[in-house]
Amino acid sequence: MAGWQNKMTIKKDDVIAALKTVYDPEIPVNIWDLGLIYDIDTDGEAVVIKMTFTSPTCPMMEELVGQIREVVGAAVGAPVRVDLVWDPPWNLSMMSDVARLELDLTEQGW
């Protein structure tokens, strides 16, 4: 995250806290714990979030991206750019332990 401290005094923890308020509408877990966020950086003028979805055909993609821009932008007082990436593809191993517990997924169950 070479550009993280460029010209901006935004704290990564504030961005993460805001991301944890955004939930996948089909899964009762926030997008951070689902492992959908691949990177958080800044280009000096905006927060840049690289993220993926569980499926490239997610019908809620635009709504979730808009929600991310809104909540992160409000939390840090800066514009937010969301870049969608598909490599590596999302899989269950990217979920946090919190998400696995919430969804009752054990090592044996997935």
Image (spheres, rainbow, N blue to C red):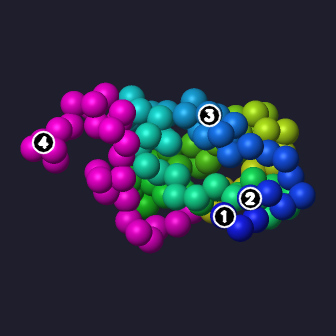
Q: Which residue is mark 3?
A: 17
- Residue at mark 4 to residue at mark 3: CA–CA distance: 29 Å
- Residue at mark 1 to residue at mark 3: CA–CA distance: 18 Å
Q: Mark 4 and 2 residues: CB-CB less than 8 Å, in contact?
A: no
Residue in the picture at 29% in, 53% down: 93
Work out which residue is located at the far right of the displayed protein and give it. Answer: 7
- Residue at mark 1 to residue at mark 4: CA–CA distance: 34 Å
State yes or no: residue 19 in magenta. Answer: no
Instruction: Evaluate whether residue 43 shows in this view.
Output: yes
Q: Is residue 32 left or right of residue 40?
A: left
Work out which residue is located at the far bottom of the displayed protein and give it. Answer: 87
First reached walking from the N terminus: tag 1 or tag 3: 1
Q: Which residue is mark 2?
A: 4
Secondary structure at numbered mark 3: helix
Look at the picture and state if 110 lies above or below 90: above
| Camera-side mark, 1 or 4 | 1
State which region is magenta: 84-110
Q: Residues within 10 Å of mark 1 (few under 14, many from 20)?
A: few
Residue in the picture at 89% in, 58% down: 7
Name the amino acid, label 4: Gly
First reached walking from the N terminus: tag 4 or tag 2: 2
Name the amino acid, label 1: Met
Q: Mark 2 and 1 residues: CB-CB less than 8 Å, in contact?
A: yes
- Residue 108 in picture, x, y percent from top left: 10, 44
Q: Which residue is mark 4?
A: 109
Q: Residues within 10 Å of mark 4 (few under 14, many from 20)?
A: few
Which secondary structure type mostly characterizes the magenta part of the structure?
loop
Work out which residue is located at the far left of the displayed protein and give it. Answer: 108
First reached walking from the N terminus: tag 2 or tag 3: 2
Q: Which residue is mark 1?
A: 1
Name the amino acid, label 3: Ala
